[in-house]
């Protein structure tokens, strides 16, 4: 049986790599993303009867194309299609960290939200309603402390549920202004015509409206012969409508 692939995503300094190291131990190695100087780490761990291949994505604040780190994390989640994207958040700075989680959920519902540093949050008098957040986001949410090894088994159980398909997500869908939604609606059929339905057409349409040329470059590289001329035409109309 092939191992499930788990992508570890998160802002810098959320304890993402601490959790990755805790789970993989010495069963890991580092390298570089293809064509980039960005370092990646991969490892392996087991839980119950399943083996997991863990990929530690670069720490990023978003999945836009502001840096090579962000492009590497974005491209991995989109094109490698991990069985689970584990988004690690800092419990002491949850509002800021949720931005990345929402971006991941626009790409994939195969996600688990891991709220790390829960012990530190409690010391600061911060209360977090995990059930309410899970209900709102539509995916499993678990509070842990990687450093203190709190909640790890519960986290692994939720990863297993998503990886095996025992849990089917209905992730939160973000609604934008009428103008942006109109642009997205116009672009989606052209995106699907160009690349099919394998990749998240709504999210790609949104990034095209934002003028994300690096995403087009990545799509062409992964699809080989994709033609985005029609989509680019609609981008112009969509951007005009937004203004």
Image (tube, rainbow, N blue to C red):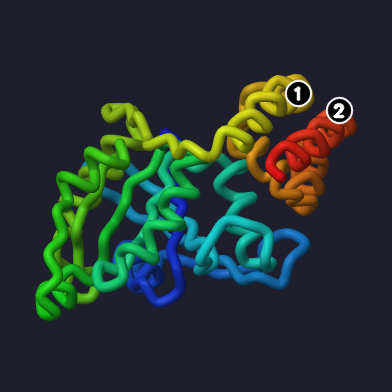
- Most extreme residue toward the front is 243
- What is the x, y in percent for residue 117? 23, 71
Q: Nearer the viewer, residue 151 or 131?
A: 131
Q: Is residue 1 above or below residue 153?
A: above
Q: From the image, which quarter does the N terminus lie in?
A: top left
Q: Relative to residue 130, is residue 208 drawn left or right?
A: right
**How busy is the neighbourhood of tag 1: few (under 14 within 10 Å), some, or many (20 plus)?**
many
Residue at 43%, 35% in the rendered image = 173
Q: Which mark is residue 24?
A: none
- What is the x, y in percent for residue 103? 49, 49
The quadrant where residue 206 appears: top right
Distance from disc 1 to disc 2, alpha carbons, whole Å, reads 7 Å
**Residue matched to label 2:** 230
The quadrant where residue 58 appears: bottom right
Residue at 62%, 66% in the rendered image = 69
Q: From the image, which quarter does the C terminus lie in?
A: top right
Q: Relative to residue 64, is residue 125 drawn left or right?
A: left
The quadrant where residue 37 appears: bottom right
Q: Element type at marker 1?
A: helix
Q: Element type at marker 2?
A: helix
Q: Which mark is residue 190?
A: 1
Residue at 60%, 52% in the rendered image = 74
């Amino acid at each position: 049986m092939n191992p499930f692939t788990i992508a570890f995503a998160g802002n810098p300094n959320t304890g993402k790599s601490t959790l990755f190291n805790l789970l993989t131990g010495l069963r890991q190695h580092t390298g570089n993303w293809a064509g980039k100087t960005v370092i990646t780490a991969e490892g392996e761990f087991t839980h119950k009867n399943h083996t997991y291949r863990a990929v530690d994505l670069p720490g990023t604040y978003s999945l836009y194309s502001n840096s090579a780190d962000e492009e590497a994390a974005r491209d991995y989640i989109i094109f490698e299609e991990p069985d689970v994207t584990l988004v690690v958040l800092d419990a002491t700075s949850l509002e800021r960290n949720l931005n990345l989680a929402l971006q991941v959920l626009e790409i994939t519902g195969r996600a688990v939200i891991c709220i790390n540093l829960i012990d530190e949050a409690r010391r600061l008098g911060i209360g977090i309603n995990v059930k309410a957040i899970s209900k709102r986001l539509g995916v499993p949410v678990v509070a842990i402390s990687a450093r203190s090894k709190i909640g790890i088994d519960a986290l692994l159980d939720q990863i297993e549920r998503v990886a095996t398909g025992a849990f089917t997500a209905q992730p939160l869908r973000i609604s934008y202004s009428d103008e942006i939604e109109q642009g997205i609606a116009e672009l989606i059929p052209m995106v699907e015509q160009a690349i099919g339905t394998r990749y998240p057409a709504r999210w790609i349409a949104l990034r095209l409206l934002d003028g994300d040329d690096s995403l087009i470059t990545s799509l062409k590289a992964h699809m080989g012969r994709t033609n985005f001329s029609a989509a680019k035409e609609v981008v112009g109309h969509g951007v005009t409508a937004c203004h």
